[in-house]
């Protein structure tokens, strides 16, 4: 398959809304995960990767890219996202790679740690961990509207789970392995309606740098990708419906990004071919918004 560019036009996005966590099928237009555009170059040949939140959005795009780069993949997801997980698995297997399905609620410590053990057992090892699972809620008007339930869901999904999953994975990662966390432009330019989400992404940046320092002597690299506004099911599931009509148009490039456009950054950081001397870095894929 030759390299192709993902669609870089600004599509019409009608007002639309789903209930969390959101699914791909009802989205209009459909996101581009690289199904037709991503071409592999052997950058992850023989590697074994676990991607949390791998059923849809950025996670699906990363799973497809990793598979086409030669990796076997396990994907974590919530049970209610089975439809999306099955579709991701179809694309991974079409690339000739193994795809292990690991349903789990990462807000529960036992399930979070158990998901890693399942992935390792069924893949036969682990070389790359992608902490991609995340949750936000932007349907609020002020700081006073942040509820304890919101905090629990956001903090446990974005931070607690990352710690639990990474701790468990470190028992299996060795020299040459890589951890890639999913940060966000919100760590640098926080929106008022996303104060809890933005704070977790700033914390992820801090964890990334600290882990990179600690794990360097073991030959394990730790980095993060900070996406900007990317068209994924999380948007119609957590944003006010009318905001989606102009979603991403406040970026210097004037549009939202597609999941496929983020996947290359994860491949670069996960691969020992392209990222062997890169650690403690947060790579922005933001449509021009600065990450500093």
Image: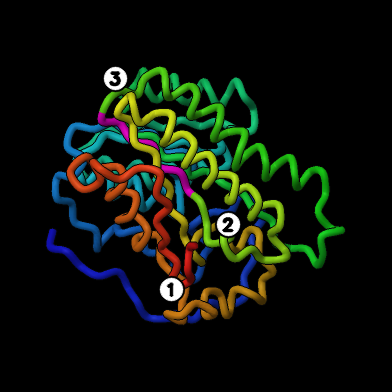
Mark 2 vs 3, N-terminal side: 3
Disc 2 target residue: 187
Residue placed at 53% from the left, 62% from the top? Answer: 185
- Indicate the position of residue 151 as horizontal and vertical percent values: 75, 45
Q: What residue span does the magenta drawing correspond to?
A: 176-182
Q: In the displayed structure, does residue 233 sit left or right of residue 96? A: right
Mark 3 vs 1, N-terminal side: 3
- Indicate the position of residue 23 as horizontal and vertical percent values: 54, 54
Q: Is residue 149 magenta?
A: no
- Indicate the position of residue 148 as horizontal and vertical percent values: 82, 44
Residue placed at 69% from the left, 69% from the top? Answer: 240
Q: In the displayed structure, does residue 159 sit left or right of residue 174? A: right
On the question of residue 84 being in view, the answer is no
Q: Which mark is residue 288?
A: 1
Q: How far apart, in angstroms, are the residues tagged by discs 3 and 1?
A: 40 Å
The rendered magenta stretch, by its main secondary structure, is classed as strand
């Amino acid at each position: 398959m030759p390299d192709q560019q993902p669609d870089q036009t600004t599509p019409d996005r009608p007002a639309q809304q789903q209930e969390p966590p959101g699914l791909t099928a009802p989205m209009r237009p459909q996101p581009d995960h690289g199904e037709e555009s991503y071409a592999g170059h052997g950058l992850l040949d023989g590697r074994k990767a676990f991607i949390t939140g791998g059923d849809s959005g950025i996670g699906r795009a990363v799973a497809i890219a990793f598979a086409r780069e030669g990796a076997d993949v396990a994907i974590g997801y919530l049970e209610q996202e089975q439809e999306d997980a099955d579709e991701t698995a179809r694309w991974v297997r079409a690339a000739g790679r193994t795809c292990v399905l690991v349903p789990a609620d990462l807000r529960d410590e036992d399930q979070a740690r158990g998901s890693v053990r399942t992935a390792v057992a069924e893949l036969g090892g682990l070389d790359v961990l992608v902490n991609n699972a995340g949750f936000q809620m932007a349907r609020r008007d002020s700081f006073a509207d942040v509820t304890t339930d919101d905090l629990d869901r956001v903090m446990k999904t974005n931070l607690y789970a990352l710690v639990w999953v990474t701790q468990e994975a470190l028992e299996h990662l060795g020299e040459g392995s890589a951890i890639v966390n999913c940060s966000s432009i919100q760590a640098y330019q926080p929106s008022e309606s996303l104060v809890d989400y933005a704070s977790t992404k700033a914390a992820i940046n801090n964890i990334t740098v600290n882990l990179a320092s600690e794990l360097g002597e073991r030959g394990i690299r730790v980095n993060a990708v900070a996406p900007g506004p990317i068209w994924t099911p999380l948007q119609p599931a957590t944003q006010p419906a009318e905001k989606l009509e102009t979603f991403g148009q406040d970026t210097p490039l004037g549009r939202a990004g597609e999941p496929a456009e983020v996947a290359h950054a994860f491949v670069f950081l996960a691969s020992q071919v392209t990222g062997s001397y890169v650690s403690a870095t947060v790579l922005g894929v933001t449509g021009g918004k600065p990450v500093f």
